[in-house]
Amino acid sequence: MAQVTLNVQGMSCNHCVNAVEKAVRGAGGQAKVDLPNGKVEVEFDEGKVQLGAIKEAIEDQGYDVV
């Protein structure tokens, strides 16, 4: 399993946390959001999903992965 910390802009509330975590799960990973710091710790199986797909899933929810 790979672990990556992403910087995500635009998150401001618990709804944002839920949206990001759900998007990452939908892409095949697991996420833990650090809302105050704008960070998302992502864990995923590199053999099953690419990091780009996870970033795209987050961006599709309206957030910016920088």
Image (cartoon, helix red, strand yellow):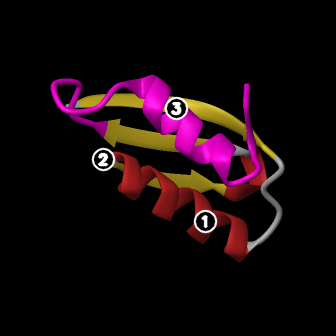
Q: Earlier in the sequence, mark 3 or mark 2?
A: 3
Q: Which quadrant does the C terminus fall into? A: top right
- Cα separation, mark 2 vs mark 1, equals 14 Å
Please state which amino acid type lies under the numbered disc 2. Gly
Mark 1, residue position: 19
Q: Position of residue 62 (x, y in %)?
A: 76, 51
For residue 12, which quarter of the picture?
bottom right
**Residue located 60% across and 45% down the image:** 58
Instruction: Determine whether the residue tagged by mark 2 lies in a helix, strand or loop.
Output: loop
Number of marks drawn: 3
Please state which amino acid type lies under the numbered disc 1. Ala
**Residue located 48% across and 64% down the image:** 22
Cβ–Cβ below 8 Å for labels 1 and 3? no
**Residue located 57% across and 35% down the image:** 56
Q: Earlier in the sequence, mark 2 or mark 1?
A: 1
Residue 45 lies within the magenta run: yes
Mark 1 neighbour density, 10 Å: few (under 14) some (14–19) many (20 or more)? some
In this rendering, position of residue 12 left or right of residue 51: right
Q: Position of residue 60 (x, y in %)?
A: 65, 47
Q: Position of residue 46 (x, y in %)?
A: 23, 25
> Mark 1 or mark 3: which is in front?
1
Q: Position of residue 26 (x, y in %)?
A: 39, 56
* Range drawn in magenta: 44-66
Q: Earlier in the sequence, mark 1 or mark 3?
A: 3
Q: Which quadrant does the N terminus fall into? A: top left
Mark 3, residue position: 5
Mark 2 neighbour density, 10 Å: few (under 14) some (14–19) many (20 or more)? some
Which of the labelled discs sits on residue 28, or is there none? 2
- Cα separation, mark 1 vs mark 3, equals 17 Å
Residue 56 vs 14, above or below: the answer is: above
Instruction: Determine whether the residue tagged by mark 1 lies in a helix, strand or loop.
Output: helix
